Image (cartoon, rainbow, N blue to C red):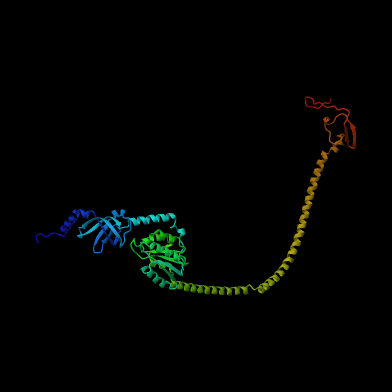
Amino acid sequence: MAGAYSVSQVNAYIKNMFAQDFALNRISVKGEVSNCKYHTSGHIYFTLKDGTSSIAAVMFAGYRKGLSFQMEEGQQVVVKGSVEVYERDGRYQLYAQEIKREGLGDLFERFQKLRNELEEMGMFSPEYKKPIPRYAKTIGIVTAPTGAAIRDIMNISARRNPYVQLYLYPALVQGESAKESIAKGIGTLDQMGLDVLIVGRGGGSIEDLWAFNEETVARAIFQCSTPVISAVGHETDVTIADYVADMRAPTPSAAAELAVFDYRLFEEQIQLYRNTLSKTMERKIERCRYHANQYGLKLKYFDPGRTIRENRQRLSDMEVKLHTLMLAKTARDKAEAAELALRLKNLIEKQAVRDRHRLELFTSRLEAQSPLKKIGGGYGFVTDEKGRRVDSVKQVKAGDNVRLRVRDGSMEAVVSRITPEKAPKDGSLESK
């Protein structure tokens, strides 16, 4: 057919038309996020829609640096970028360069400012977190009386433990008066001495959940002496109340799971413990019975009477053996004693002969050195008045008394003159 165009030509023509349109090259589109997918390549694929229409959109990885939040289903956003034709498929889509959440600028700044202030005050510190009781019997709930949150909590509580008592404070969870209503509900239930409180509501936009970002509610939770579980919105929603509470639950249903212990599971555990204890006791009794039998056998084996009889017989045998050994030992000892006496006698006699010979030698040496023997040869022994030997003229002076001892006696004399001898030059002695 004449004048027919190919698909590629048509798509290229349309793409060119879009490229030449100034309004489509710089456009901001407002809508709700749907079908959002984060690709492994880093690109984000999503659909932007309103009440009647939708448009495909993509944000390439290179533009994600300016994205300050996690995109999720249902978010209201403003996307700035260009509308272009994807030539291969012949469809157009919005290429996002910048994405902002609609109406969240001021709220987000307020959220960050209050969060930082409360964090500096220490209201988020772990040391202030109170433990959630494991077996709560009374649970207080601060939420709307007609919302899905209270129905979920009641259903889960009835299923897990029908004996738990629930106390509902019907509070406003949205609007201008919501923060005062929530704070009052927390204070009222705290005075009742309950085991735990659940404070929260179902999901919604950030505007709907804003009451739980108010400082009034945060301080009421912080000052509450009862442990508080925060359960606001969906799992991805985070509020100031979540930071201050003793525990955060992703949803009200999860809060009920955390606060209400499973009574059926509790009974099963008790029964399991009972069976385990019974089996343990049976095994213990069996072991004790076995040990008692073993001890009985040992007692018979180690009977004191039997031991005494055996020891008496052993003692009798030892007496006989000892008597025999003593007789033999006495004979051996006598022979050994006689032999030892003879050897000792011989040793004494030999030692006496040696000592007698040595004595004779010492006697002869002593006699040779005796001055009396020398005196007997015509010499005398001179001492002074005190009996000290005088062997030099320097030891006495004229008029001193001296004693002379000769062979057959002694005599006393007085020194009348002293004549020292001079030694000759050749060394021989010469009288003066």
Pick the front one: 193 or 322: 193
Instruction: Say which quadrant the C terminus sits in.
Output: top right
Q: Position of residue 289 (x, y in %)?
A: 56, 75
Write the residue at 79% across / 50% down. 352
Quadrant for residue 261, please give it: bottom left
Write the residue at 82% across / 41% down. 366
Left or right: where 141 falls relative to 283: left
Q: Position of residue 325 (x, y in %)?
A: 72, 66
Left or right: where 319 falls relative to 141: right
Q: How many marks?
A: 0
Q: Position of residue 1 (x, y in %)?
A: 9, 62
Q: Position of residue 412 (x, y in %)?
A: 90, 34
Pick the front one: 281 or 32: 32
Quadrant for residue 339, please give it: bottom right
Q: Is residue 38 visible?
A: no
- Which residue lies most toward the left here? 2
- Which residue lies most toward the front here? 177
Quadrant for residue 31, please give it: bottom left
| 60 over 143 or under it: above or below | above
Q: Is residue 336 visible?
A: yes
